[in-house]
């Protein structure tokens, strides 16, 4: 599965990438220019998206809503450290993971 990681913390994006690649996934990361994710181009060859809800300059829920409206075939998984923000993603994502979480939980959410 080809997964796009949308996470502004480079170290966490790197760890997520390693964990998903260990599980056999092809990973694309997005650590800057988050507004660009509200256009078709970044999603044309992606099967799933792992999206942080708290991003600089844009809400992760806006990206989830865009995907739901324009690319419903892309599996959406949200991640956050805030339980109140997790509630905002219910209905927009197939799963909401609260940080910290295990790679096994992430892999299960993508299935």
Image (cartoon, rainbow, N blue to C red):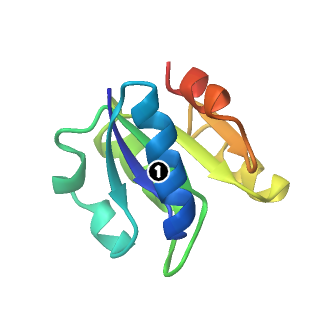
Return the residue found at the far bottom: 57
Query: In the rendered image, which residue does mark 1 sit on?
Result: 65
Residue 68 placed where, x, y %? Answer: 41, 41
The front one of 34 and 39 is 34
Which residue: 18% across, 38% down?
A: 45
Instruction: Label 1, secondary structure: give it.
Output: helix
Quadrant housing residue 67: top left
Question: Horizontally, is 79 left or right of 47 in the view?
Answer: right
Which residue: 42% across, 51% down?
A: 5
Which residue: 69% across, 41% down?
A: 97
Quadrant housing residue 73: top left
Residue 34 placed where, x, y %? Answer: 38, 70
Residue 8 placed where, x, y %? Answer: 50, 70
Residue 21 placed where, x, y %? Answer: 40, 35
| Mark 1 Cα shell of 10 Å, populated few (<14), some (14-19), many (≥20) | some
Up-down: is 71 above or below 38? above
* Quadrant occupied by the N terminus: top left
> What is the total number of numbered labels drawn onto the structure image?
1
Return the residue found at the far right: 83
């Amino acid at each position: 599965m080809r997964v796009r990681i949308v996470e502004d913390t480079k170290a966490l994006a790197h760890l997520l990438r390693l964990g998903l690649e260990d599980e056999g996934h092809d990973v694309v990361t997005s650590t800057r220019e988050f507004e660009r994710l509200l256009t078709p181009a970044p999603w044309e060859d992606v099967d799933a998206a792992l999206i942080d809800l708290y991003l600089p300059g844009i809400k992760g829920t806006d990206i989830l809503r865009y995907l739901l409206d324009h690319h419903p075939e892309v599996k959406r998984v949200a991640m956050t450290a805030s339980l109140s923000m997790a509630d905002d993603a219910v209905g927009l994502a197939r799963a909401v993971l609260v940080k910290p979480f295990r790679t096994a939980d992430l892999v299960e959410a993508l299935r």
